[in-house]
Amino acid sequence: VQLQASGGGLVQPGGSLRLSCTTSGFILDFYAIGWFRQAPGKEREAVSSISTSDGSAYYADSVKGRFTISRDNAKRTVYLQMNGLKPEDTAVYSCAAKWGRVYEESWPRVYYDYWGQGTQVTVSS
C-alpha cells in the first residue's frame, strides 16, 4: 500500500497550487481520503476529506471556500486544489486513506489506515 503526495512548492500569497495524492496497492473506490497538514511546532491539522460512493467532501473552517478536494478513482488519485493561499497555509501536507465512508461530524478524528509521505507547501512573498 502506498500513498504519495506531490505538487507542493513555493507560492506567493494569493497564489494557487494543486496537490495530488497518488495511490497504489489498494482499491481507491472503497476508501475515503483525507488531507492533513503540519507546520513546524504545531500539531497536525485535518484539512479536508472526501468520502467514498457519493464523494461527499468536508473541509476545515480555515480552508473552506479556498480549497477543493476531488477524486479520480480511475487514475487512483485524489487532488487538493488550493486557491487564495495564505502564509498560514505553510506546512507539510500529507494524505491518508480510510476504509469506508467518512462523515461530516467525525471526519477529522477518525482513524486513517494508511498514510503517505508529505509534500512541502510554502506561502511567502
Image: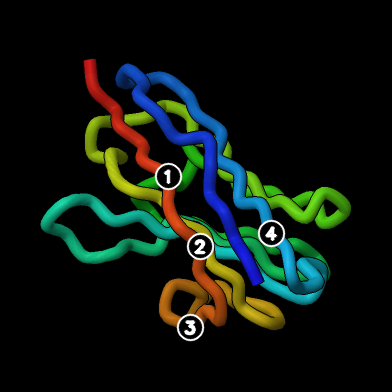
* Type of the residue with mark 1: Thr
| Location of residue 13 by image quarter | top left
- Is the N terminus in the top left, top right, bottom left or bottom right quadrant? bottom right
Q: Could you say which disc has been placed on residue 23 in the image? A: 4
Disc 1 from disc 2: Cα separation:
10 Å
Q: Which of marks 3 and 2 is in front?
A: 2
Q: Distance between the residues labelled 3 and 4?
A: 20 Å
Q: Mark 1 points at which residue?
A: 119
Q: Give the quarter of the figure containing the C terminus.
A: top left
Q: Marks 3 and 2, how far apart in space?
A: 17 Å
Density class for disc 1 (Cα within 10 Å; few <14, some 14-19, many ≥20) is many
Q: Counting other residues with Cα less than 10 Å from the Cα at mark 2, is it few (<14), some (14-19), or many (20 or more)?
A: some
Q: Is mark 1 on a helix, strand or loop?
A: strand
The residue at 82%/49% (across/down) is 75
**Front-lying residue, 31 or 50:** 31
At a point 82% along the width and 68% down the height, the residue shown is 29
